Amino acid sequence: MRILITGGSGFIGSFLSEKLVTDGHEVLCLDNLFTGNKENVAHLLDKNNFSFINHDIIDPFYFDGKIDQIYNLACPASPIHYQQNPVRTIKANTIGVINMLGLARAHGAKILQASTSEVYGDPEVSPQKENYRGSVNTIGPRACYDEGKRCAETLFFDYKRMHGMNIKVIRIFNTYGPKMALDDGRVMSNFIIQALKNENITIYGDGSQTRSFCYISDLVDGMVKMMNSDFSGPINLGNPNEMTIKSLAEMIIKKLNSKSKLIFMNLPEDDPKQRCPDISLAKSKLNWEPKVSLEEGLDYISDFFKKKLENIE
């Protein structure tokens, strides 16, 4: 099959690209390199079944050959990056999504939207099920991403209703692994880098807020299963093992034998107090659940960041 991946050289997209190339598919990797990095797919560039195309999905994309599947991952996912140009973030999730849905319709292709747990906002229930409609501040600093992704889901289901398209919507919870950017700004990369440098670990709030962390290979496995299923979604993909941010910091300090100390700062506006997926639907519809433990995953990502920092020094 010929498969288009938007955001294909980003953290998640590069792992998905590698899996699909390895599985023998022809992969078109579309990325404007705003947060993606061509180094993430450098080992694929000489493969006959992989092509890199520098393109922003806010602009229409045309392709002469047949496209069978589209994974739409193109959108900055870290608050630092998506708040840098909030209007552009919204455009990626509206104009860009419309462009990709139009492309999928023209080619008769299946299309998967990488949505997010952020559609649940600062949830009033936990764990979050797919039928929970969320508690989102439409005018806050995170709204460009939260509301953008909610609108993207709306567009997908409207195209399904209007045109009978074969759509898939996944809601991705916190994911981590090698190839995360050093300036990613998310909790896992921040804590590990600070611990490796023996710097103070910065916790926003009192550290009682919760998250759950899914290793990248588990997520990609779930994405492929969803694309090849008969289910449209939405469906949660994440690790249901919930923990506090403070516990994560202490775990990383211990694992890396770091001299870092914890410091506490004000919690950013609209930062969710709890985040944990109910994955019952993924288990029943996709026969999917995470396999990599946090202990194991931390070893992989710590080794990656250690080598990255050594190369910089």
Image: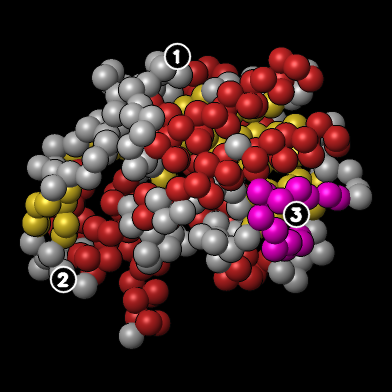
User: Which mark is drawn over residue 131?
Assistant: 1
Instruction: Locate residue 240, reporting x and y percent.
Output: 34, 30
Q: Is the magenta stretch mostly helix, strand or loop?
A: loop
Relative horizontal placement of residue 276, taking residue 32 as reference (left or right): left
User: Which mark is drawn over residue 198?
Assistant: 2
Which of the pair 292/187 is nearer the observer?
187
Locate the C terminus and report the quarter of the image it occupies: bottom left
Q: Is residue 61 magenta?
A: yes
Circle nearer the N terminus (1, 3)? 3
- Magenta residues? 50-63
Q: Identify residue type, mark 1.
A: Asn
Disc 2 to disc 3, C-alpha distance: 41 Å
Any part of residue 131 in sight: yes
Instruction: Locate residue 161, reporting x and y percent.
Output: 71, 15
Disc 2 to disc 1, C-alpha distance: 43 Å
Which of the pair 155/130 is nearer the observer?
155
Circle nearer the N terminus (2, 1)? 1
Identified at 21% across, 56% down, the residue is 252
Q: Check the image and report above or below for 277 versus 132.
A: below
Q: Identify residue type, mark 3.
A: Leu
User: Which mark is drawn over residue 58?
Assistant: none
Q: In which quarter of the image is residue 300?
A: bottom left
Instruction: Locate residue 158, reporting x and y percent.
Output: 67, 20
Q: Does the magenta stretch include residue 214?
A: no
| Secondary structure state at the residue bearing disc 3 | strand
Which of the pair 91/239 is nearer the observer?
91
* Residue with the most extreme right position: 64
Circle nearer the N terminus (2, 3)? 3
Relative horizontal placement of residue 92, taking residue 49 as reference (left or right): left
Q: Name the residue under label 3.
A: 28
Identified at 13% across, 44% down, the residue is 205
Q: Identify residue type, mark 2.
A: Asn
